[in-house]
Amino acid sequence: MSSPLKKSLKLALIQLASSADKTSNLTSARQKVLEASKAGAHLVVLPECFNSPYGTKYFDKYAETLLPSPPKDSQTFTALSKLAKEAGVYLVGGSIPERDDKDEKKLYNTSLTFAPSGELMATHRKVHLFDIDIPGKIKFRESDVLSPGNKITLVDLPEYGKIAIAICYDIRFPELAMIAARKGAFLLLYPGAFNLTTGALHWELLARARATDNQVYVGLCSPARDMKAEYNAWGHSMLVDPNAMVVEQLDEKEGTLIQELVAGRIDEIRKGVPLYGQRRFDVYPDVSEGGRFKE
Ligand SMILES: NC(=O)CC(=O)C(=O)O
């Protein structure tokens, strides 16, 4: 099996402090991305809903139409595309609320990835919508206002290999990660805004679980926590290595994590614990190849 990561790569996860002011969020994102690029990052990631507050009542107000691409009138698309080019980095633009170009009532939670040329490489619409109700703690229903995406998103960075992009709640669904890893991703990236209840319980656990299952790098990029906002993000952006060790984890405040993903590390881990040659597709199906379970 060829190595999923062809060359070492510096990853930056920007834990941005966002406000209700879209223009000022874009300005501070620009400043942090340029700083990360100066520090040597090749791939830079912003958080979920980095240009708006996170909450069902905000999606419609902040939504931008992104199709057909390039869109005529999207402040955020234009800013991210220019920024990727200015910084000379691959830029995963966290996520933003998107308005469907044909049905203006339809909204998505969408991540845009740009090449260092400024060209759009991929779009991921959050596949699994965040609908939870934990009595006395937190109730949230993205599906009241959002529609789900319907694909797994792999992006080929020619010098390095493939990365997979999904958003926040998507991390709870191991099938998506497993398929992406079996299709050759070396890194699973999740811009995500967990909260004080589920963050404490599951954030690190899920990142390490997806890394353990798949023996790949996992990066989670959260907004910084704002206790004055209605939704308090967990923060704790982190990078986990293919052996499920936390390489670095931020606290809840604004900050940037920059770490190297080392070529050869995935191969070393897979050699020691050779899951990739031990799967029993005669017992259960390989869902990454469209297999179905037969009793
Ligand atoms: N905000 C999310 O999409 C997910 C989350 O907070 C959780 O899964 O917990």
Image (cartoon, grey):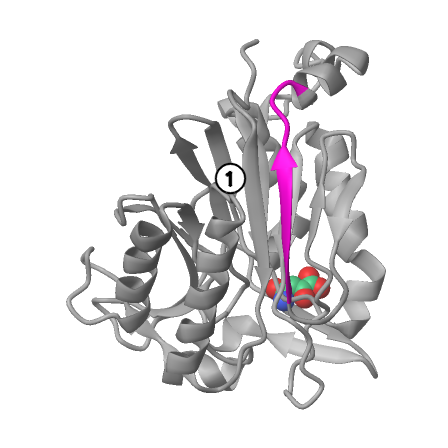
Ligand 1 is found in the corner quadrant, namely: bottom right
Q: Is residue 131 left or right of residue 43?
A: right
Give residue 109's position: percent from left, percent from top: 45, 65
Which residue is outermost to the front?
38
Q: Residue at x 50, y 36 (%)?
A: 163
Taking the magenta stretch, the answer to whether it contains residue 120 is no
Q: Residue at x 25, y 47 (%)?
A: 119
Give the vertical position of 226 relative to 79 (above or below): below
Q: Position of residue 274 (x, y in %)?
A: 75, 13
Taking 227 as reference, is 192 left or right?
A: left
Viewer-nearest residue: 291 or 226: 226
244 sits left or right of 110 in the view: right
Q: How many marks?
A: 1
Residue corresponding to mark 1: 164
- The answer to whether 279 is drawn above or below residue 233 in the figure is above
Q: Is residue 92 visible?
A: yes
Q: Which one is nearer the viewer's eye here, 96 or 158? A: 158
Most extreme residue toward the left is 72
For the C terminus, the quadrant is: top right
Q: Secondary structure at mark 1?
A: strand
Question: In the rendered image, which quarter contains the N terminus?
Answer: top right
Single out the residue that lies furthest toward the bottom: 228
Of 205 and 5, nearer the camera is: 5
The residue nearer to you, when weighing 289 against 41, is 41
What range of the chain is rendered magenta? Answer: 255-264
Q: Main secondary structure of the magenta part?
A: strand
- Please provide percent x and percent y for residue 138: 74, 79
Q: Please determine whether, in this image, residue 196 is positioned above or below residue 61.
A: above
Three-letter amino acid code at disc 1? Ala
**Image spot of residue 113 (x, y percent):** 38, 49
Residue shown at 27% from the left, 49% from the top: 118
